[in-house]
Image (cartoon, rainbow, N blue to C red):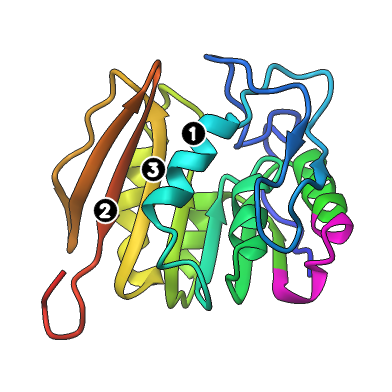
Amino acid sequence: MIRRAVSFEENVTEGARSLESGPADMRVITGTARGKKLKTLEGLEVRPTSDMVKEAIFSIIQFDVPGSSVLDLFAGSGQLGIEALSRGASHCVFVDRSRDAVEIVKDNISHCCFTSCSRLLNMDSLEYLRVSKGGFDIALLDPPYRTGILSEALLKLENCLAPGAIVVCEHERELTLDDTVGRLNVRKRYRYGRIALTVYQMPDEDGAE
């Protein structure tokens, strides 16, 4: 399903970053779509998540992925959500405001045979968080760097998450996110060269993390 919304700056994908170049050929690392090559946007300065960082993300959340409901916000090529589906997630919502990015994600999920367990929305990510009913078990956030949008997204994300949900944020190394954002609490921080990961978790229904 594709929803058309928010047309400003559509020539720049929310998932496009220019600080560090990603691999020329993106691929699914493991799972049911292992080895499938993924498209990325051409003609733009993009920084797809490297295989090293993607491996790290899914090592961190590997036991939480099977059967989960996943949000790939600022989706870009959709590679993080697709990796989650390949590893057993039950459903993924992909959100990006760029029409070009949405067409790339559409092709990638079709190529990996994940159309039936995916929902694809062409809209602003912050607007999506405002209207979403949520219930996600995992949220993957990899927005443009040095824009402040990641902190904004975290403030709006809480109501979209299930109890005990995990949030993985990929961002520039020099950014230090708050230890607590609403009910989200930092579980761990990681650094990989110029890239950092901050992992948050929602409390369970009984208040435990």
Q: Earlier in the sequence, mark 2 or mark 3?
A: 3
* Image quadrant containing the C terminus: bottom left
Label 2: how many Cα within 10 Å (few below 14, some 14–19, many 20+): many
Q: Give the image location of residue 175, x and y in percent.
A: 28, 24
Q: Give the image location of residue 41, x and y in percent.
A: 79, 30
Specify start and end residues of the magenta stretch as a single range.
109-118
Which residue is at a point 11% across and 75% down the rendered structure image?
Answer: 208
Q: Earlier in the sequence, mark 1 or mark 2?
A: 1
Cβ–Cβ below 8 Å for labels 2 and 3? Answer: yes
Residue located beneath label 2 in the image: 200
- What residue type is disc 1 on? Val
> Is any atom of residue 161 visible in this view?
yes
From the viewer's side, name the closer residue of 59 and 199.
Answer: 59
Q: Give the image location of residue 139, x and y in percent.
A: 45, 58
Residue located beneath label 1 in the image: 53
- In the displayed structure, does residue 158 sit left or right of residue 17? left
Residue located beneath label 3 in the image: 169
**SS assignment at label 1:** helix
- What residue type is disc 3 on? Cys
Give how far apart the Cα atoms at labels 3 and 1 are: 11 Å
Give how far apart the Cα atoms at labels 2 and 3 are: 8 Å
From the viewer's side, name the closer residue of 165 and 102.
Answer: 165
Magenta-highlighted stretch: main secondary structure?
A: helix
Cβ–Cβ below 8 Å for labels 3 and 1? Answer: no
Label 1: how many Cα within 10 Å (few below 14, some 14–19, many 20+): some
Cβ–Cβ below 8 Å for labels 1 and 2? Answer: no
- In the displayed structure, does residue 159 sit left or right of residue 48? left
Q: Earlier in the sequence, mark 3 or mark 1?
A: 1
Q: Examine the structure image and report whether residue 167 is included in the region drawn in magenta.
A: no
